[in-house]
Amino acid sequence: MSVARDAQAADDGARPGRRPLLTATGLRKTYGTTPALDEADFSISPGEVVAVMGPSGSGKSTLLHCLAGIVRPDAGVVRYRDRELSAMPDAERSRLRRDEFGFVFQFGQLVPELTCLENVALPLRLGGVRRKEAERRATEWLERLEVAEVTRQRPGEVSGGQGQRVAVARALVTEPRVVFADEPTGALDSLNGERVMRLLTSAARDTGAAVVLVTHEARVAAYSDREVVVRDGRSRDLTREPAA
Amino acid sequence: MSIGHTFLGLLESGPRHGYDLKRAFDERFGQDRPLAYGQVYSTLARLLKNGLVVVEGIEPGGGPERKRYAVTDAGVTDVEDWLARPERPEPYLHSTLYTKVVLALLTGRSAADLLDSQRSEHLRLMRELTRRKTDGDLADQLVCDHALFHLEADLRWLELTAARLDDLAKEVRS
């Protein structure tokens, strides 16, 4: 674990309720004639795990994509550490996604030709870390995610639960400030899903990373600190603004 | 939970005093609500009256006499029957929530807010159980999982009802 990043996380106030790390205000996004987001707001602080919930097609994945700089909103502002993400040039947003964000998807999306170790080391190698050091850190994360036994295997040779834990290791190996997890347990059974969530949230909390967790499963959302519900493209923070 | 049947099952491993039974019950099953002594002795009195336990011995002491209870053959049969009989699923909560939703619609209040508020409360409890489960042993995990699956089922009902509110409003107001 990086001591420098731990110290930085502490400086940033790695506690829920502190200065927001990532915010979105008035987001609108339309695909063709279909509105996906309609004045959606969002905010997350360092060390916080926020579940984004809502029915299928409600706009929760679009919200995640806008927050991560993958999709540009038609209107509204996304701010990351006082910088306007939605106004950044593509190259800068790509660098940010590589260096400061981590991603976990429903189906791990590991590179099938690489071993699990090489998959986890990949974000570090792309960031210029030397192979030996990248593999040393990747090995540490595979051990932490309790999948050290698959180090030399390729993704096609491991179980779904193991593959997803490798994907979590890959997302966390650069010790990102924000982890975006889109239905990370959607393809797993209950037991493996719980294991992935326990390891993901504890590792993220230890490093001070914020986690944006998109899920439609309440049992997965229960690992979060609070939840935001998206319906018809509009967001509502139920934890902070309880209904009357 | 049937305290009487649980006592009978605990007594199958050998006779016990009332205090030992309470302690064994609380350790294994009383995570949230330890038994009151009054419950222990009233349950034992009922089991005794129904011939499901007998007093095997009485030990005099400084305080009240301590009775040792043993399960009878009829008691063992009773436990067997109880274990073999499936529990009746109890659809208890949705009827209250359904009443609240319909009343909100009938009186022009926000049923969506009511559902969101309930959803938030359910998730708060689910977070608490998840924390307890994460920090606990296997017994904690199993007990918490049972509660979590039930709360999750309630939440699915809340979500489905929220999605059907417009139709329900038309129906109740017609």
Image (cartoon, helix red, strand yellow):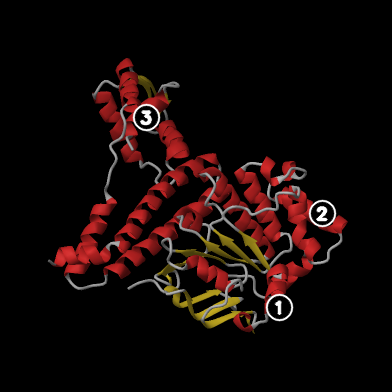
Identity of the amino acid at label 2? Glu
The structure residue drawn at horizontal position 37% and vertical position 54%, both measured from the top left corner, is B156
Residue at the outermost left position: B174
Identity of the amino acid at label 1? Glu
The structure residue drawn at horizontal position 78% and vertical position 51%, both measured from the top left corner, is A139
Q: Secondary structure at mark 2?
A: helix
Q: Where in the figure is residue A116, as x and y percent of width and height? A: 73, 48
The chain holding disc 1 is A
Q: Secondary structure at mark 1?
A: helix
Q: Where in the figure is residue B65, as x and y percent of width and height? A: 37, 28
The structure residue drawn at horizontal position 65% and vertical position 80%, both measured from the top left corner, is A81
Residue B28 in the figure: left or right of residue A85: left
- Residue B62 visible in image: no
Identify which residue, B27 or B94, lies in the foreground.
B94
Q: CA distance from mark 3 to mark 1?
A: 68 Å
**Both on one chain, marks 2 and 3?**
no
Quadrant housing the N terminus of chain A = bottom right
Identify which residue, A92 or B112, lies in the foreground.
A92
Q: List the residue tagged with mark 3.
A: B7
Label 2 or label 1, whichever comes before in sequence order: 1
Q: List the residue tagged with mark 1.
A: A92
User: Relative to A14, is B31 above or below?
Assistant: above
- Residue A232 visible in image: yes
